[in-house]
Amino acid sequence: EVAVALGWLGRWAAALTEYRLVAAARERVLGPDRPDTLVARDDEAHCLEQLGRAAEAAELYRRVATLRSVAAR
């Protein structure tokens, strides 16, 4: 996976771009609350965290947690 490799290399901005593409595609095909989509969004939040964008990361983590909670009902 390209995004994973970019993260391993410390290229977080490039990894973020890739994860956003993956998340958008999964959201379009699978839906916004599907587990695979939420994993990609969680990875996106991790990249934001690594880039020092903690507020954005926290908001995305919260959104993912909410969607997981709703989907589990």
Image (cartoon, helix red, strand yellow):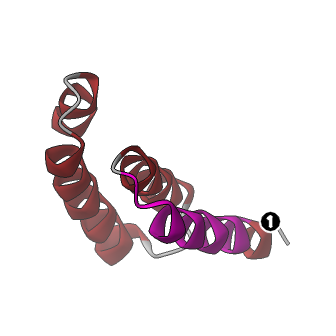
Q: Is residue 71 magenta?
A: no
User: Quarter of the image containing the C terminus?
Assistant: bottom right
Q: At 19% from the left edge and 50% from the top edge, which residue is drawn?
A: 13
Q: At 71% from the left edge and 74% from the top edge, which residue is drawn?
A: 66
Q: At 41% from the left edge and 61% from the top edge, which residue is drawn?
A: 53
Q: Nearer the viewer, residue 37 or 42?
A: 42
Task: Using the image, determine if residue 5 lies above or below residue 13.
Answer: above
| Numbered disc 1: secondary structure | loop
Please provide percent x and percent y for residue 57: 50, 62
Q: Is residue 67 left or right of residue 16?
A: right
Please provide percent x and percent y for residue 27: 37, 72
Please provide percent x and percent y for residue 22: 26, 57
User: Quarter of the image containing the N terminus?
Assistant: top left
Task: Using the image, determine if residue 53 lies above or below residue 14.
Answer: below
The magenta stretch spans which residues?
A: 52-68
Q: Is residue 60 left or right of residue 25?
A: right
Which amino acid type is marked by label 1?
Answer: Ala
Q: At 50% from the left edge and 60% from the top edge, which residue is drawn?
A: 54
Q: Nearer the viewer, residue 54 or 29?
A: 54
Res. 41 image quadrant: bottom left
- Overall secondary structure of the magenta section: helix
Most extreme residue toward the front is 52
Where does label 1 land, which residue? Answer: 72
Crowding at mark 1 (Cα within 10 Å: few <14, some 14-19, many 20+): few
Please provide percent x and percent y for residue 63: 61, 74
Task: Using the image, determine if residue 43 lies above or below residue 7.
Answer: below
Q: Is residue 64 left or right of residue 46?
A: right
